[in-house]
Every structure is written in structure tokens, then in C-alpha cells.
């Protein structure tokens, strides 16, 4: 049992250090060797944990999104906040995350463009990684609708609206490099208040 725990701890550590490499070097320039060097292990040892760079990248993203989801879930389940406050707080936290990880989102874009060049569907990959976020948004929207705090005839449409705002924010912050946090947060606040009763 201790061997499994140590294996998972090492795997977690590799993913953390690999994410730093991806952010510093970009997806194309990050290599298996650079990741192994940063982790203080050989490439052969690294192959015991991951089969290639793409797998490390995908698992690094999954690890990051799991941490983000755990933080968001705390807000979503915080019953001392109104559902309106929960939705607004969650969306603002996502905007802050985008700003803090601007370079990371550029790397994700680069990765998705590579996926597209190989003839695969980048949207399917994004949907797989964001389905839980969309589910968390739906939870708040459904709870708000059921409690009479939100006037939304269609939860899916409201979810699409807020998710679209998140995608737009990522594009504006990470890709266009605009320093518009406050403007984006004001737009989100406006959207949240427009569905509140």
C-alpha cells in the first residue's frame, strides 16, 4: 500500500513540475527530457509514470482543473451566501484565475491548435475538461430557479450565456492580453443581476 501512495505522490509532483515547464517553455518546447530534468529523474523513470508529453500535459490540466473545481465547490455550497452571490463569486473567481494563468491559457490554445492540425476535434477536448464546470454552473442556476431567486425560463440557455462570458473573458485576457478584469467582472455582475428576481 505504501508503494502505491509513494507512486501517486511522485506522479502528483511530476505533474506540478511539468505544468511549470509547460508555462515557462510552451507546449512545443517542453520536452520529456526537460520534465525529467526538472523532476530530478531520468527519462526512463518518467516513462514509468507517463507514456508521452501529451499525456503529462493532459493530466497536468486535469490536476489544475480539479483544484479549481474544489475551490468553486466551496463557494457553491456556502449557504451563508445567496445564490446570486454564489454565482457572481464563482464567475469572478474564474476571471481572476484566467488573469493569474494568462500564459497557461496561451499554451492550452497552442495545444488545441496542434490537435486541430492533426484532424482531431479540439472542441471535444475542451468540452471533456469543462463539463464539470458547466455542471457546477447548472447546479447554482437550478437551485436559484427552484428557490425563486432567478427568473430563467431555460437553465441550459442561462448556462450557455455564463459559459460564453467565461470563454470571452479567457479570449480577451489570455489571447488579446487585455487588462480588463474590472470591465469583465462588471459585465458578469450585470448578467447575474439581470436574471435575479
Image: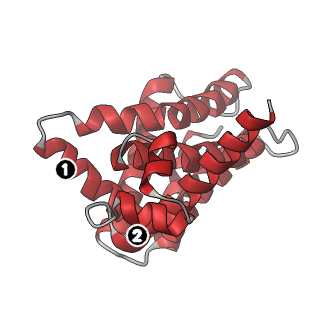
- Distance, label 1 to label 2, CA atoms, is 17 Å
Say which residue appears at 67% left-offset and 41% top-offset.
8
For the residues carrying marks 1 and 2, which lies nearer the camera in this image?
A: 1
Please tell me which residue is depicted at 21% across the width and 43% down the height of the picture: 115
Residue hosting label 1: 114
How far across and how far down the image is residue 151, in percent? Answer: 58, 30
Disc 2 crowd, CA 10 A, few/some/many (<14, 14-19, 20+):
some
Q: Nearer the viewer, residue 77 or 110?
A: 110
Disc 1: CA contacts within 10 A as few (<14), some (14-19) or many (>=20): some
- At mark 1, the secondary structure is helix
Q: Is residue 146 above or below residue 80?
A: above
| Residue 61, image x, y percentages | 48, 48
Q: Quadrant of the N terminus?
A: top right
The answer to which of marks 1 and 2 sits earlier in the sequence is: 2
Q: Nearer the viewer, residue 131 or 12?
A: 12
Q: Tell me where residue 189 appears, x and y as whole percent.
A: 57, 56
Outermost residue to the bottom: 179
Measured as percent of width and height from the top left, residue 165 is found at 42, 50
Residue 13: quadrant of the picture: bottom right
Callouts 1 and 2 close, C-beta under 8 Å: no
Q: Which mark is residue 38?
A: none
* Secondary structure at numbered mark 2: helix
Q: Which residue is mark 2?
A: 103
Can the viewer see residue 165 in this picture? no
Amino acid at each position: 500500500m505504501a508503494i502505491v501512495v509513494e507512486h501517486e505522490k511522485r506522479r502528483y509532483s511530476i505533474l506540478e513540475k511539468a505544468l511549470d515547464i509547460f508555462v515557462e517553455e510552451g507546449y512545443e518546447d517542453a520536452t520529456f527530457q526537460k520534465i525529467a530534468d526538472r523532476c530530478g529523474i531520468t527519462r526512463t523513470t518518467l516513462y514509468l509514470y507517463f507514456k508521452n508529453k501529451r499525456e503529462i500535459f493532459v493530466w497536468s490540466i486535469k490536476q489544475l482543473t480539479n483544484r479549481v473545481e474544489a475551490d468553486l465547490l466551496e463557494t457553491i455550497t456556502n449557504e451563508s451566501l445567496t445564490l446570486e452571490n454564489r454565482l457572481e463569486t464563482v464567475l469572478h473567481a474564474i476571471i481572476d484565475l484566467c488573469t493569474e494563468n494568462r500564459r497557461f491559457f496561451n499554451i492550452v490554445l497552442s495545444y488545441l491548435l496542434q490537435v486541430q492540425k492533426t484532424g482531431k476535434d479540439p472542441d471535444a477536448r475542451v468540452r471533456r475538461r469543462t463539463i464539470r464546470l458547466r455542471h457546477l454552473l447548472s447546479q447554482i442556476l437550478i437551485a436559484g430557479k427552484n428557490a425563486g431567486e432567478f427568473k430563467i425560463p431555460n437553465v441550459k440557455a442561462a448556462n450557455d450565456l455564463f459559459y460564453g462570458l467565461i470563454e470571452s473573458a479567457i479570449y480577451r485576457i489570455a489571447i488579446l492580453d487585455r487588462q480588463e478584469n474590472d470591465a469583465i467582472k462588471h459585465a458578469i455582475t450585470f448578467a447575474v443581476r439581470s436574471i435575479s428576481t
